[in-house]
Amino acid sequence: MTGTNLFEQQKRNLRRTTGFLAGFVAFLAFLGIGADFFLYGSGAGPGFPIATIGALLFGAGSSLWALRAGDRAVLESANARPVDRSDPGQQQLDNIVEEMAIAGGLPKPAVYVIPDHDPNAFATGSGPEKSSVAVTAGLIEALNREELQAVVSHEMAHVKNYDVRLMTVVAALVGSVLLISDFGRRGIRWGGGRRRSSRSGGGGGAVMLVFLVLWIVSILLAPLIARLVAMAVSREREYLADASGSELTRNPGALASALEKIDAAKEPTPSIKQGVAHLCIADPRGRRINEREGGLAELLATHPPIAKRIALLREMAYQAR
Amino acid sequence: MGAIGGCFLFLVLIAVFAAIWAIWRYNNLVALKYQVANAWKQIDVQLKRRHDLIPNLIAAVRGEMQFEQDTLEKVIAARNSAVAARGVADTAEKENALTQTLSRLFALAENYPNLKANESVRTLMEELTSTENKVGFARQYYNDVATRYNTAQQVFPDSLIAQTFKFQPVELYEIKEPAEREVPKVDLNIRPQ
């Protein structure tokens, strides 16, 4: 049986993701602490660490807002419509979603169809109790029943593994980091000089200098680092969703052939905005970036190279025999 | 006094921890037991839906498929005996027989292009196909949860709790018929009807 194999992969991916998230929060705190030390000078005395608390609160607040209202915003931006059971293809889609919900022992998510010819799909929501699965009309057309089931199982796995929740939070945290680093850059320009002149006699000069340099470098690189981390998390979740989705259907081969068909349609999916890319089955930008392996190309993608995913799935299909 | 008091305190602490552990493991078993019951109910819901759909489908295809009376009768007979089934093993066997007659019907229906063009037949076919899948997935989920429940009863030291409170292992929903497991024998001899 492949059960243990899939399960191990799931556990390993979950551990890594916890690490990523902890790193994110630490990074946010680091930016805040630095601002307190160098811009407001409160770190040296018993002052109130306003920037640290502000940064963490802002991150938490925007995450909460995204969890409460984010799914509706995403569905509206993609122009998604509730499934229409009088259409044969959509009736089948609705049935398939219910089948996969049963396989995962989950409540059935709301089903939406996006009027777009490019095959793609995404899941959104804040957890298994409140989730939605959206599929493009092109996907329903291009895939057979087994393949459509495999894609839905991938999305259902995103729901079951709390990926939709994690990715929503990560997106909100990236936003917070961007905003705070922006504040920080302005602070360096305006307030940095004032602090140095008033407090230059303080002890531990060398350590403070290293900290200051590190902090300024982080502020400058924050937008890039935040995006890289978000994409790394996203890629992990894709492998995990491929694995645990196949655990639902017990048919990794169908997902492999579905991915081949999606890959063959190279056009971007204009209806799906870039902000939702990490929730899709394949990158909606339709860029060739997902095909190159290793190095920078892989760092900048929200999804692992499709060829790599297909190879892994084929391997699972072989083991299942 | 000090030594005895210390010993006493030590024993009390151990007893408290043992009690907390026992309650925790007991609750775990109870939670699993209800998950199993719930998973079984899900199978039941889908089986009922299947039983309800079959007469509709038969009525819809009867006109076109009058030369397949034999197959249609078999489907109805299998459905009726499945409706009467009780218990996990009995249900599994009779539902499996129904699955086989149904797949034969589906295969035969491929020969009737008129049926596929018929809107209501097509809708019914899709509903029944989906229900077949749902039965399969509900069974898969039930077996997963049931296996977890049975394993939890047997691993040490949880087995002590399971034995004390008389938790019983549950039956898996298995396909017992040898026909499903054997390699199909292909017989190409043409026999006179």
Image (cartoon, coloured by chain):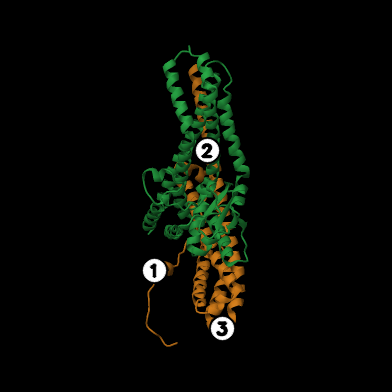
Chain colours: A green, B orange
Q: Residue at x 50, y 49 (%)?
A: B149
The amino acid type, in three-letter code, at marker 2 is Val
Q: Are marks 1 and 2 in contact (CB under 8 Å)?
A: no
- The secondary element bearing badge 3 is classed as helix
Residue B85 locus on image (x, y percent): 56, 66
Mark 1 and mark 3: span between their CA atoms? 32 Å
Q: Residue at x 55, y 57 (%)?
A: A135
Q: Nearer the viewer, mark 1 or mark 2?
A: 2
Q: Is A173 placed above or below A235 here?
A: above
- The secondary element bearing badge 1 is classed as loop
The label shown at residue A174 is 2
Residue A7 visible in image: yes
Q: Are marks 1 and 3 in contact (CB under 8 Å)?
A: no
Query: Does mark 3 fall on the same chain as mark 2?
Result: no
Residue B155 visible in image: no
Q: Nearer the viewer, mark 1 or mark 3?
A: 3
